[in-house]
Amino acid sequence: MRFLHSLVLAFFLSAVAASAEEATPASARDTDIRKIEGIFGSDLPKTERKGSVRLILHPHFGDLTNRDYIRVLTGLRWGVNDHMELTTGVESYFDHGLKSTSPGTGVGDVRFGGKYSFREKLIPGYDTSVGANLYFPVGHPPVGMTNGHNSYSPYFVIGKKIVRYPGLTLFLNTGLDFLQKTNIPGSFERNTPHSSSVSLTPGLVYDRYPFHYTLEFSYETTSLIGKDNKQFFTIRPGVAWDLPPSLKFHSKGRVTIGAGIHVTSGPDGFSTGGGGKLRAEFGISRWFRKDSKKNNDK
């Protein structure tokens, strides 16, 4: 019965995605790589185009073998104007029915974000942006789903497109991560900070649509704003592929699959990890335009 519930969930996600399609031509901004949890973790300077609203679905299919539940991140990204975007998301968990134990079904965390792009006005020749990501565990999620802390993460990012090599972008992302303990039980992954930290992440992105190649070098320290003195060094290469229409049932949304690995040196020694990810994005701006038109006709 639980497996049947999982099939129903998959069908529901597909139906929502199909109904959210928006028949608009893709721009260069739409085909560039964006942050994909587990593959490419850095925010880049670009923002969503003005007036665009995107529905984001990110099921963690790797949970089918690694956990007794599956996480599904559902979010929205809104291009407020030519310089600003806002994001929000909810990560739910569902019993997938493939293991004997059952954590139930619920919402594990909520997320909010915002980004303001200065384009090349702040530093001529370089794209720059400032933003923040907020993360809050909620409810009674499985212990391994969250670390039990609220996270407030402001950042500044600078990027440079290399004209000599079309598709190549170099970037530098620096940020703070302020952790606040909650009464929700959680656990930290190996070689991750247990208190507030400062991070510095240079890297590169090579967009050769429909393929995208990423490489990040991250340094994180709790020495400046944390409660201890821990250092973390991570290398994270990744690759992503935008599926062609024939493999996404000719929908006009964007479906990206990818894989990445990471090697981290920290207080727990060397640790490695990786896996495959899938993320789908669909334009839903027309939903709001229809509602607006109906209201004007009344």
Image (cartoon, rainbow, N blue to C red):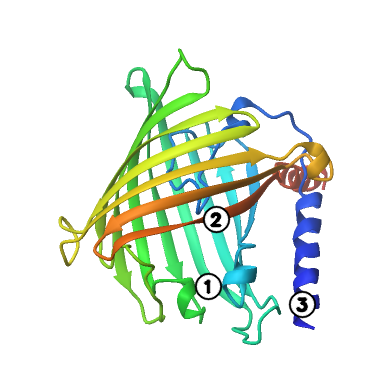
- Residue 181: give x, y in percent of width and height: 31, 74
**Could you classify mark 2 by the number of other residues whose Cα lies within 10 Å: few (under 14), some (14-19), or many (20 or more)?**
few
Instruction: Decide which of tag 2 and tag 1 comes sooner along the chain.
Output: 1
User: Is label 2 or label 3 in front?
Assistant: 2
Q: Is residue 133 left or right of residue 64?
A: left
Residue highlighted by disc 2:
275
- Residue 133: give x, y in percent of width and height: 41, 53
Residue 59, quarter of picture: bottom right
Instruction: Decide which of tag 2 and tag 3 comes sooner along the chain.
Output: 3
Distance, label 1 to label 3, CA atoms, is 21 Å
Q: Nearer the viewer, residue 192 or 197?
A: 192
Whether residue 49 is visible, yes or no, is no
Residue highlighted by disc 3:
3
Q: Is residue 213 left or right of residue 99?
A: left
**Whether label 2 touches label 3, CB < 8 Å:** no
Residue at the limit of the structure toward the top, as seen here: 164
Residue drawn at x 75%, y 60% as measured from the top left:
13
Residue drawn at x 77%, y 39% as measured from the top left:
252
Q: Nearer the viewer, residue 179 or 60?
A: 60
Whether residue 246 is visible, yes or no, is yes
SS at mark 2? strand
Residue highlighted by disc 1:
108
SS at mark 1? strand
Residue 61, quarter of picture: bottom right
- Amino acid beneath label 3: Phe
- Is 275 placed above or below 285 here? below
- Is 163 placed above or below 39 here? above
